[in-house]
Image (cartoon, helix red, strand yellow):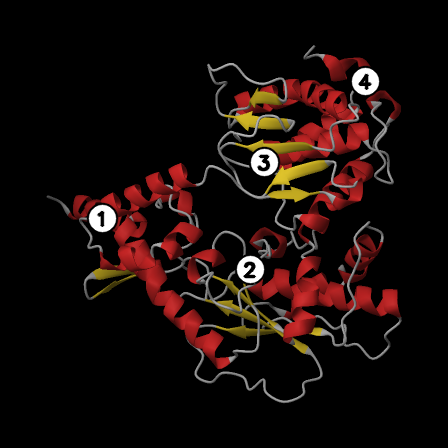
């Protein structure tokens, strides 16, 4: 066997170890121990896992954990793509920061970096924009509104370019429909990684609310390091669809004792059993009413099986249409993932609008619920369309979709209504584009699914 083939086989083995279930879970458990140590060092501070990746490192049973996730997206901090995205304003966490006198944001990153861009740039952008918005909204001249970034991760040139965009982002937030809760102190990011030799002292009366940007994973060469009994994988919580076999962070932590006892050989079987049991047990999820429209539209907080209480009007976004006869109070819309689903989504919109109007026009009906079977993206999109089609700009039900003309801003406002009650709501760019296309097409084209 020549050297080239040996190197090729070694690379295959390395990639297999990176995506191996056992290695990922052992790495997450190791990193979560570090996160717990930081939590214990600052017990007064609330802990907020960054959506998706961060949730793997934070035990939701901890008293300090913020119940609604935060979402600081790394791409909003990528070079020349910097942004304060109004869809990820994270305003729901400001009262939590005021009460707790700060916040710990937990995230991680894969090989090549000590900190993800979400922590080195997206969070600092957020802190500065929030501070500037508060200064303008509440006339607070003493607030420090300067941008703060780690010099070892952000160059002076990049820092300066981000600074030049802050005022425009601040105006975007102030011109939105969001209510910005007042803070008594400005926000200031502080960075902690497993490589720090000394933790910053944060006791006593500070002049700011510290936002600790905590990167959970160790920085190791090539993102992987052989250790006793397993291979440590940096940033194991990232891209969990590629390795988790359907396991989610809540189920991981709910069954962590059982998972910790499993060896490399048994781990897939243990995880599969947990996932199967979870799908059977979660037959129902909580409903989130949209307050702006007097709770007449409600969204499921998580994907869920078809609700059994079929007397309540419900739009159910399913992977397939069931064979059993359905109640007239249940509209099942088959919307697949991928390109095929985009066409199905567009065809489903007029049906969803007519179904909602029919039931909300009925004086005996108070609300309509919307839920997805396996994911929330299409359900969120349908909720936005219903809100735009049947409610005016003040949230009043009109029931007459043809009277509403929309712009991208008015459509985005409907998402803001949802996010006021459901901060984690974040439809994909594709879904947003389809919604814009639907409302900005000639009116006759909005009824092609009749």
| Residue 440 quadrant | top right
Q: Is residue 198 above or below residue 153?
A: below
| Label 1 crowd (10 A; few <14 / some 14-19 / many >=20) | few
User: Total label count?
Assistant: 4
Label 3 to label 4, Cα distance in Å? 25 Å
| Label 2 crowd (10 A; few <14 / some 14-19 / many >=20) | many
Left or right: 196, with 1 as reference point: right
Label 2 to label 3, Cα distance in Å? 25 Å
Residue at the (20%, 52%) spot, across then down: 264
Instruction: Name the outermost residue toward the top.
Output: 450
Given residues 99 and 415, the one toward you in this image is: 99
Q: Name the residue that disc number 1 marks.
A: 13
Left or right: 250, with 435 as reference point: left
Label 2 to label 1, Cα distance in Å? 29 Å
Is label 3 or label 1 in front? 3
Q: Name the residue that disc number 2 marks.
A: 117
Residue at the (84%, 70%) spot, across then down: 135
Q: Name the residue that disc number 3 marks.
A: 377
Left or right: 287, with 254 as reference point: right
Q: Name the residue that disc number 4 marks.
A: 442
Q: Earlier in the sequence, mark 3 or mark 4?
A: 3
Do the residues bearing badges 4 and 2 touch, measured as CB atoms within 8 Å? Answer: no
Q: Earlier in the sequence, mark 4 or mark 1?
A: 1
Q: Where residue 334 sits in the image (x, y, percent)? A: 54, 21
Instruction: Name the outermost residue toward the front.
Output: 364
Given residues 154 and 22, the one toward you in this image is: 22
Residue at the (83%, 39%) spot, across then down: 395
């Amino acid at each position: 066997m020549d050297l080239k083939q040996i190197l090729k086989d070694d690379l295959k083995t390395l990639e297999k170890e990176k995506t191996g279930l056992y290695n990922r879970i052992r790495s997450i458990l190791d990193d979560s121990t570090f996160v717990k140590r930081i939590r214990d060092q600052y017990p007064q501070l609330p802990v907020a896992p960054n959506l998706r990746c961060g949730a793997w490192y934070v035990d939701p049973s901890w008293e300090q954990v913020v119940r609604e996730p935060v979402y600081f997206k790394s791409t909003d901090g990528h070079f020349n793509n910097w942004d304060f995205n109004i869809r990820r304003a994270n305003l729901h966490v400001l009262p939590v920061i005021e009460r707790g006198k700060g916040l710990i944001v937990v995230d991680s990153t894969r090989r090549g970096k000590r900190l993800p861009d979400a922590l080195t740039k997206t969070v600092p952008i957020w802190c500065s924009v929030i501070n500037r918005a508060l200064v303008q909204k509440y006339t607070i001249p003493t607030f420090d509104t300067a941008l703060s970034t780690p010099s070892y991760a952000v160059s002076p040139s990049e820092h300066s370019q981000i600074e030049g965009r802050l005022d425009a982002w601040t105006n975007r937030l102030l011109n939105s429909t969001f209510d910005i809760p007042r803070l008594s102190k400005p926000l200031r990011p502080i960075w902690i990684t497993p490589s720090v030799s000394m933790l910053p002292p944060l006791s006593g009366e500070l002049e700011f609310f510290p936002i600790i940007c905590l990167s959970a994973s160790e920085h190791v060469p090539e993102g992987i390091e052989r250790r006793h009994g397993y291979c440590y994988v940096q940033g194991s919580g990232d891209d969990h669809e590629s390795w988790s076999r359907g396991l989610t962070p809540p189920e991981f932590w709910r069954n962590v004792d059982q998972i910790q006892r499993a060896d490399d050989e048994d781990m897939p079987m243990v995880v599969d059993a947990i996932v199967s049991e979870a799908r059977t047990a979660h037959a129902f999820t909580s409903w989130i009413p949209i307050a702006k429209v007097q709770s007449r539209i409600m969204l499921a907080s998580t994907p869920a099986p078809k609700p059994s209480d079929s007397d309540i009007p419900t739009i159910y976004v399913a992977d397939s249409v069931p064979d059993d006869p359905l109640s007239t109070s249940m509209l099942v819309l088959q919307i697949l993932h991928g390109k095929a689903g985009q066409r199905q989504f567009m065809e489903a919109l007029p049906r969803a609008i007519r179904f909602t109007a029919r039931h909300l026009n009925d004086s005996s009906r108070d609300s309509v619920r919307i839920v997805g079977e396996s994911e929330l993206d299409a359900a969120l999109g349908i909720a936005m369309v219903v809100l735009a089609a049947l409610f005016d700009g003040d949230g009043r039900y009109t029931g007459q979709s043809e009277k509403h003309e929309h712009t991208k801003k008015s459509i985005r406002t409907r998402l803001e209504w949802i996010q006021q009650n459901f901060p984690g709501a974040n439809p994909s760019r594709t879904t947003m584009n389809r919604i814009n296309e639907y409302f900005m097409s000639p009116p006759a084209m909005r009824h092609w699914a009749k």
